[in-house]
Image (tube, helix red, strand yellow):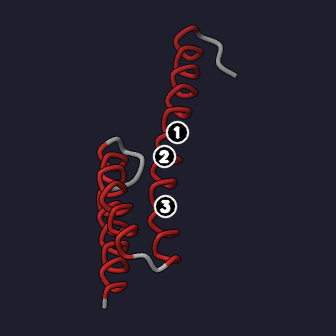
């Protein structure tokens, strides 16, 4: 357990940052899930719209350090590939 005032403050800061990160991660996952649901329904227009709104959200999470930059790029790339394959 933290004893010094600085350690107690650090614990509070970590807890606050964790809450923010959880919210950001959850928001990103929600946007990804919307794309997944649109893909499952087979509606390319809805999937394209969902991807268009999900992409900046995923990249924002990467810029905030929630996910690695390459992980975010890979997610966007794979989702875009799946949306594109709906039209074929």
Of callouts 3 and 1, the N-terminal one = 1
Rendered residue at 52%/77% (across/down): 40
Kindly identify which numbered label has been placed on residue 58: none
Q: Secondary structure at mark 2?
A: helix
Q: Residue furthest top?
A: 5
Compare residues 78 and 44 and report the one nearer the observer.
44
Mark 2 Cα-neighbour bin, 10 Å: few <14, some 14–19, many ≥20? some
Of callouts 2 and 3, the N-terminal one = 2
Rendered residue at 46%/75% (across/down): 39
Kindly identify which numbered label has been placed on residue 27: 2
Q: Are marks 2 and 3 in contact (CB under 8 Å)?
A: no
Image side of residue 65 versus residue 1, left or right: left
Looking at the picture, how far across and down is residue 42, in whole percent?
Answer: 46, 80
Q: What is the C-alpha distance between the residues marked 2 and 3?
A: 11 Å
Looking at the picture, how far across and down is residue 46, in whole percent?
Answer: 39, 67
Rendered residue at 32%/85% (across/down): 87
Please say if 20 is above or below 9. below
Q: Secondary structure at mark 1?
A: helix
Q: Are marks 2 and 1 in contact (CB under 8 Å)?
A: yes
User: Can you identify the residue that label 1 sits on?
Assistant: 23
Mark 3 Cα-neighbour bin, 10 Å: few <14, some 14–19, many ≥20? some
Q: Which quarter shows the C terminus?
A: bottom left
């Amino acid at each position: 357990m933290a004893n010094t005032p600085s350690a107690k403050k650090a614990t509070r800061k970590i807890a606050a940052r964790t809450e923010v990160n959880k919210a950001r991660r959850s928001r990103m996952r929600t946007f990804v899930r919307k794309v997944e649901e649109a893909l499952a329904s087979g509606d390319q227009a809805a999937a394209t719209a969902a991807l268009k709104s999900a992409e900046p959200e995923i990249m924002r999470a990467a810029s905030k350090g929630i996910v690695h930059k390459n992980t975010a790029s890979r997610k966007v790339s794979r989702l875009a590939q799946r949306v594109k394959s709906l039209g074929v």
